[in-house]
Image: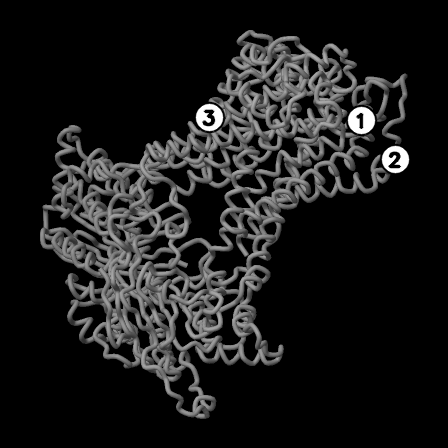
Amino acid sequence: MTIVAASRVSPRRGGTGVRWLIGRLGGLLFVLWAAATLTFFALRLIPGDPAEALLGGPGSQASDEALAAAREEYGLNQPLWMQYLAQMGRYLLLDFGTSYSLREPVSSVIAEQFPGTLLLASLALALAWVLAITVAVWSARSGRIAGALGSALEVVAVALPHFWLATSLVLLFSTTLGWLPPISGRSPSGLVLPVITLAIPLAGFLGQVMRESLLNALSSPFAQSARTRGETATGVIWRHGLRHAALPAIGLSGWAFGTLVSGAVVVETVFARPGLGRTLLSAVQARDIPLVTGTVLVVALAYSLVTTLTDVLDRIADPRLRTEANA
Amino acid sequence: MSVEAIYSAARVGAAPLVRIDGLTVRFAGADSPAVDNITLTIAAGECLALVGESGSGKSVTARSLVGLAGAGAQVSADTLEVNGLSLLGLSERRLERMRGAVVGSISQDALVSLDPLRLIGREVDDALRLHTRLSPTDRRARVLQLLTQSGIPDPETRVGQRSGELSGGLRQRVLIAAALAAGPRILIADEPTTALDSQVRDGVLRLIADQATAGTAVLLISHDLTAVAAIADRVAVMKDGRIVEEGDTSAVLHNPQHPYTRQLLAASPANKPRHQLLLSGPTARESLPSTRTGDRTASAPEPRPALALEATDLSVAFSSGRDRSRPVLQNVSFALPVGTTLGLVGPSGSGKTTLARIALGLQQPDSGELRLLGKPWSSTPEKLRRADRALIGAIYQDPLGSFDPRSTVRAILADAVQRDGASPSRAGRTTRVTELLDSVGLASNIAERRPHSLSGGQRQRVAIARALAAEPRVLILDEPVSALDVTIQAQILDLLDALQRDRGLSYLFISHDTDVIAHMSDSVLRLD
Amino acid sequence: MKRPSVVETAPVVVLAFFVVSAVAPNLIAPGDPLAIDPLASFQAPSAGHPLGTDESGRDILTRIVHGAAPSLLIGVLATAIGVGLGLVLGIVGGLGPRWLDTTSTRFVEVLFAFPGLLLALLFIAIAGPGPVTSTIAVGLATAPGYARLVRSQVLSVRRSGYVEAALVLGHGWWRRLLRHILPNVTATLFVLVTLGVGQSIVWASSLSYLGLGVSPPAAEWGAMLNSGRTYVASFWWMTFFPGLAIVLSAAATTLLGRSLQSRVRSS
């Protein structure tokens, strides 16, 4: 029903660019604070002595001195609200305590491991974009059968679990063909298989989104109108279609970055590649609470920053988000 | 063939610029051809109007002239020539070189035919880039010149804007500039004014007429007979893929020979006095309700309020997401006497819909008051208002969106009949549904269908039946016929008029179509 | 109604196979999935063992068939937990007063700050590994996505033309809720659940693979992959086939959800 034009009921998306950005950053700070608070209180839900939990749970058989030291370090003898304030203060300084399993400050562990994972995730994101655009453009140009084929490929790609894809790739390229090392290490050739593993399922997802909006754009009146001015079928895809196809994918790239970092937990483990994901997994297995919370919070921080960035890019790429005059 | 060669070929003689002979277009899977053996010519400097209702094949004809009849279309013809160039068997590459250079096209969806992500300047520049060898600097100057010629003020600013920053009228002018950019000798305008407000419409039509005066062959496709009368030299009337009548504009419009042309002319509300039935004959009788008897005579004449709606100084500061510099409504006052129609006109964004929402109690005015049948309405809290909601109903432009997608017509009407407190029995509801369908001229076998399987006219009748279910005294009609073809529009207008006289209903009638408003209204309120 | 196509029937056939495996595994593979046979360890696929054997000589086909029940059950339960939480948050947000909507939206936003499996890993770190916690963990990790979808669905139905039409007719809040809003929201929810089960199966088996969920020697697909990890270079069938079962079941549920979705949309 046209009487409720969408713009009349939906909330305003934002005022001027600066006001919008301030609002967005405010939201970011809120989310980070709330995530830290949530983590703090979730840890209090662990049954038993919190000092013992910090040192690896009842199985760790921590000495009385160690327990006392932990109580002292985290101020566990103080009232809850003081502990909370102290903890938030430490988080502000990026101080996440000491990993008992690695006997190192959590922040230095993270500083050491994060760059590798960031590189892995960034390369995978770039590869996924290239794959998704290729499949989308190819299937948009080549008619219905290619479209159905592309769509089937995408569904299978999305359903591929990282661990299975990784082992299958290792079987094919390392064990059988011997082209690439099965263990990633730090060499550039070792990066190839992990990047492909992470990129394929994501490419399937981005490809679905891109193809749908590409086809929408190509069947829209403005594409038709460009054709009547003499634009070629290829010209319409490049000059009109791709921008429209890229928009939703830009918006999703922040989210995609998050799933890549989460996927790195599996992929780094399969390929025995050092990185934040593998650190997180061993921390969870060892129930190394300071290391787990530190890692999770740093990833949440990075993830929130990236989504904010993609929101900004989205606004730059799509003028409709900035001008409301036609809404 | 180069563009220059095409031009020189045309200058040879005074042959028509468009020659169509025996054009037939079939779509895969369709029973009958979309275009069936039509023959047309358009000379230089001539404007030919192709009129007919949706599905008559007029747009397919136009698209065939640029080789874009659509996927799965089989085009055959004895002759299909533009500017002496036969399109039959022409390669896609040659067609692309022809489009925009020989034939310019203006499409009907003015609001969405410009890429929202691209700059206006680039959209207009496309044809120059594709069809001329001008340098970028020359092209830029030419774009500015084209925009000025198309009546766009301040073109230097406009080239750097996107379609979202332009009004509907300006967007259509940009599209005209883009269509004319490479200097085509033929211009196709497919419903160029449908999405536009009436004031903007005349300017756009004049701009198109100017092209014909300047020597372009213009093919105007329209359902709007007023527009056709204003600018076309000749008219061809299409029905079911065939041309049923063709001739000079004044001859066809004033002395129509074919019954279908007469029906089209009759169905147009232009210059028809109030309460005159638009349609007569079998079509009309079938679609009008059987007259109600009984229940109205019984009631003793109680003192009735004289005014159905009365608005005093209604103001709404601004709605979300809009230009905040001007209010939506400012001190609007009006009175709608019982049993009459108040027409509400104004350009888009003038607050027509806001006013309708206030009348329906869906939105509160910032100041001022609206009274319903002499009682306070807009100032009443929702809890108290609910009891009186039955007094006022609404009919919208798109009835489909106002029906629950899971429901059949019967379920929709039964739901509306079943009022809180007084629920009739199952049998009573069934009778009532049949009554309601009958009152809007629908057969009762339609009750088991779902709205999306109905035609536009049938949907609108179901919407009217639902509005009548609560026995309202006032109806808010928000563009109720804007999405309908002219014959169906006439049927609905006749039905609304009959219901009004039969039941003493009061209408607040919103439309952008001044002819419809003039025919339906006792008084008119214009918002700016 | 049009005849179902290959794309629509293939997933149904695949799922039917796994469901039969889950309900009556002995119909398809009448062996003991845990029976060890050290003499027959690490056998490649052959007539006797179509999919080979593992390090203790257990038949992989038998284990995959018997593993369908726990693997699918964990996926379905995790989806149920996720959808349940998502429904509560989404409906509260979509129907409740504005302050409640803001609160629940903010809460969901905070949960969203832990992308993918991170929320699940955090939960397991706190609650400890195991089949129950990993199921809950996957449910928790998927809940924010469902909450967002449910909320937007509730809002779009609530603001739809037909709900407004019911308001104009004078129908009360409860009647609009029960007659129009809830039925139209649940119609799409069904599709959502089908689409979500595939993802839950993949995530839950990922956790088992990482040694945080079901542990070997139980016949669960993720756990089978976990125990095959060590031998991947020499005995590929130990990881390939259980993984294939996961891919097939996940892709089949996704495709099924898709075709349900397009049917719902077109009707």
- Quarter of the figure that contains the C terminus of chain C: bottom right
Q: Residue A282's image quarter? A: top right
Residue at point 40% right, 89% down? B302
Host chain of mark 1: C
Q: Amino acid at mark 2?
A: Pro
Asked if both marks, 3 and 1, belong to the same chain, the answer given is no
Q: Amino acid at mark 3?
A: Val
Callout 1 environment at 10 Å: few (<14), some (14 to 19), or many (20+)? Answer: many
The answer to whether residue A201 shows anywhere in this view is no
Which residue is denoted by mark 3 in the rendering? A306
Q: Nearer the viewer, residue B502 or B300?
A: B300
Cα separation, mark 3 vs mark 1, equals 43 Å
Q: Which mark is residue C30?
A: 2
**Residue B369 position (above or below residue A72):** below
Cα separation, mark 1 vs mark 2, equals 13 Å
Q: Amino acid at mark 1?
A: Ile
- Residue B508 point in image, percent of width and height: 33, 71
Callout 3 environment at 10 Å: few (<14), some (14 to 19), or many (20+)? Answer: some
Residue at point 22% right, 52% down? B169
Relative to C137, C144 lies left or right = left
Which residue is denoted by mark 1 in the rendering? C60
Host chain of mark 2: C
Relative to B53, B16 lies left or right = left
- Give the SS element for disc 2: loop
